[in-house]
Image (cartoon, rainbow, N blue to C red):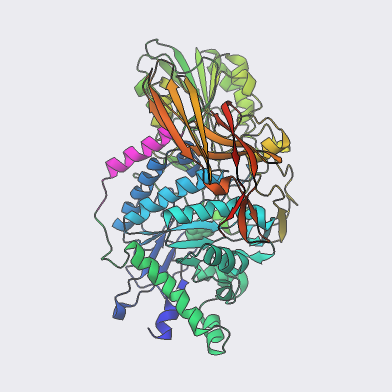
Amino acid sequence: MTDDERFSLLVGVMGAGELWPVPDERIPPGVPMSAAYVPGIPRLGVPALLMSDAGLGVTNPGYRPGDTATALPAGLALAASFDPALAREAGGLIGREARSRGFNVQLAGAMNLARDPRNGRNFEYVSEDPLLTATIAAESVKGIQHEGVISTVKHYSLNGNETNRHWLDAVIDPDAHRESDLLAFEMAIERGAPGAVMAAYNKINGDYAAANDVLINGVLKGAWGYRGWVMSDWGATPGWECALAGLDQECGAQIDALLWGSEAFGDPLRAAHAEGGLASERLSDMVRRILRSMFAVGVDRAHVGPAPDMDAHNEIALRIARAGIVLLANRGALPLAPESSPRIAVIGGYAHAGVAAGYGSAAVVPPGGYAAVVPIGGQGLEAGMRNLYLLPSSPLSELRERLPRAQIEFDPGLGPAEAAMAARRADVAIVFAVRAEGEGFDGADLSLPWGQDAVIAAVAAANPNTVVVLETGNPVTMPWRNSVNAILQAWYPGQNGGRAIAEVLAGVVNPSGRLPITFPVDLGQTPRPELPDPATPWGTPTTIDYFEGADVGYRWFAKRGLAPMFAFGHGLSYTRFEYRDLVLGAGDTISASFSVANVGDRAGADVPQLYLTSAPGERCSRLLGFERVELEPGATRRVSIEADARLLAHYDGGAGTWRIAPGGYTVAVGASAVALRLAGGVELAGRAFGR
Ligand code: BGC
C-alpha cells in the first residue's frame, strides 16, 4: 500500500442527512449513504466501508428516501428477555437488513452500563450489570457478524450520561472501572469478537475517550490483546494525537471540524507523519487493524446481500417485545378475562396510533413509516433529532382484535378530569403512558411528562381496577403505584409492540421479562440525586464523579441496604415457579446447579438468577449467572451455572491482575436481586489470574 492509500482508510465522512445537511464531495454519487463512508482501494480489492447505525435496526436519518427497516424493541427490552438466543436473532436480522443495502459496518453493540436512570440513551443499552450486558451484547454482535457485517461495541467507555457529553469528564476509580463497565466490554469482546470498538464522546479521568492512552493502548489493546480497530464517535476526535493513544480511525470527521476547528486524521495526521510525530509502524498498525477485521468478518466478499424476509423479521420483533415486557405489579387485574365482555377504557399514550420509540441515532423508520412524529427540539447539536416517534402498532386496535367481546372506549388522556370520566364508565381502565427519551439529553427527573402522572392518579381514583402500561426508556417514579391494580413495563417495544402488549394484557402471552435495571423509589436512592450543575448550558465542561465505582445499580442498593421500588431481575408471571435442590461446587470458581419447577397452571418462562451475596470481609450482590427456562405447568428443569471467576474477584491495578481472596463465599438463587430463595456457601482458595 502507498501511504496515500493507508491514510484514505483512516477517515470516515458523513453523508448529507437530517443531522448534517451538507453534501460532502468525498462521497461518490450513488453510494447508499448512512452514518459514514470510507473509500475503498479498488487497485487492491479493498471495498469501501459503508457504516450504518445501529443496534435496534438499520436506521435512516434522511439518507435514503423511502427506505425503511425492521424497528426492534429497545435494548433494555431485549435484555429483559434474559435470552441470549433472542439477542443472536436480533443481530442476524440487523446483519441481513444491513447487508441487503450494501452496509458492511453496523454501529451496533451499544453497551454502556445503565448507571443513571436519567440517562437518555439507556433505552439503547443493555443493563446495569456487566454479565447480562456482555452476554446480550456479544450475541447480538455475533448475529450481525455472522451475516458478513462488522459490528462495533460502543461507547468505550463510561458514556453514562448524555447532557453535555462532549464536555463531560467521567471520573472513576480505575480498578472499579475494570470491575464494571470495562468488565462488560472485556467479556463482550472475548465472546463476540467485534471487528471494531467505538470510543465514547466523554473524557474518562481527564482524557477524551479517543485520546485515552490508558484505556485504548493500555487496557483494550494491551491487557486484553484486542486485534480489531478503534474508531471515534462522530465528532469525538479532538486532534491527530489520538492516533498515539490508540485511536485507529476518525469518524464523522465533519463534526470534528465544527467542534474542534479541524478534522484530525486528514491533513493534520499526514503532517504529523511527515514531521516524524506519527511513526510509520503505527500508521501500518492502524491500517492493518481495519483490514484484519474486514477479513475476519468476511467484508472482503462481494457485499450486497439478498432482500431479507421482512415478515420473518417482523416476527422476531414481536418475539422480542413479548419476551421483554415486564409485569411489575399485579393485584389480580391481569390477565383480562377474555371470555367476559367487560367495558374497557383505554386511556392516553397515543395508544390509538402506536407505541413510543426512543430518539437519536438509533431511531429506525419502520416499514410503512412512523405512525406519527412529534418534534420536541431543544438546545445543542442533537436538538433536531429530538422527537417523540410513534411506531405503527396500535395497542388499542390490537386489544380490540384480541378481545372482540369487550366494549373498548378510547380517551386520549389529555387531562385528569376527562380521563376520569372515561374511567368511571368502564370495568377496567388501562392507561398508557409514554416518555420521549434519547440521545443528547438526560431527563431532569423520573416523572412522566405532559401531566401523565396526574392523569393516572385521577383514573385510579375514579376506577379501582386500573392498569398502567409504561412505554419509557427508563424507570419512572410512579407516585400512583399503590392505587393501581397492575403495572406493565413495555419499554420502547418496537414495531410490533402494540400487539405484544395486547397479548400480555389479554393473557395470550404469559409475561416473562425481568428488569435489567433497578427501579428506584426516587432519585434520592441513587448515587447522584443531583447531577452536577444540572442547569449548565450546552458546551460547558462538567465533571461527573462515578464514585459508586463498580457498585452500579442493584449492587449499590445492596451495599447501602436500600429497598428499591422494583429490583433488578424482578418480573411477575401468570404462573408460579419454585427453586429446589441447590448443589454448589468450588474450585477455580463457583458452580451451582438447582431445579426450577413450574407449580402454577399455565406454561411460562422463568429466569432464575444466581447471585454472589458475600465474599471474605464483604457483603455484596453480584449476578453470577442466569438462565431463561420455558416450562409447561408441572414441569421441572435442572439449571447449571459456572461463574466467570472475574465476577468473584477484585481487580488489583497495582499488581495488574485479578485477585480472588481466600475464604468463605455465599451465593443465592433468586427471582430477583432481592427475592433470594435458596442459599449456600463454599470455601475458595485465594488466587491471582489474568491481566
Ligand atoms: C452516536 C453514535 C452513532 C454515531 C453515528 C453518534 O452521535 O453517539 O452512537 O453511532 O453518532 O451516527
Residue 342 occupies quadrant:
top left
Residue drawn where x is 65% and y is 34% of the image: 520
Q: Is residue 396 visible?
A: no
Q: Is residue 330 magenta?
A: no
Secondary structure, magenta segment, majority class: helix
| Left or right of 100, for residue 162 | right
The residue that appears at 49% across and 23% down in the rendered structure is 580
**Residue with the most extreme top position:** 340
Above or below for 337 versus 638: above
Q: Is residue 548 above or below residue 256?
A: above
Q: Position of residue 158 (x, y in %)?
A: 61, 55
Q: Is residue 663 left or right of residue 234?
A: right
Task: Out of 159 and 15, give the one closest to the viewer.
Answer: 159
Depth check: 337 or 79 in front? Answer: 79
- Residue 544, quarter of picture: bottom right
Q: Quadrant of the N terminus?
A: bottom left
Residue 111 pos. (x, y %)? 52, 51
Vertical position of residue 617 compared to residue 9: above or below = above
Residue 288 in sight in this render: yes
Q: Is residue 322 magenta?
A: yes
Q: Give the farthest residue toward the left.
A: 306
The mark tally for this picture is: 0
Question: Image quarter for residue 484?
Answer: top right
Which is nearer the eye, 621 or 140?
621
Q: Quadrant of the C terminus?
A: bottom right
Residue 42, how many percent across, how many down? 30, 78
Q: Residue at x 30, y 79 (%)?
A: 44
Q: Residue at x 71, y 36 (%)?
A: 525
Residue sitting farthest toward the bottom: 275
Magenta span of residues:
307-324
| Position of residue 421 measured from the top left corner of the image (x, y, whole percent) | 56, 17
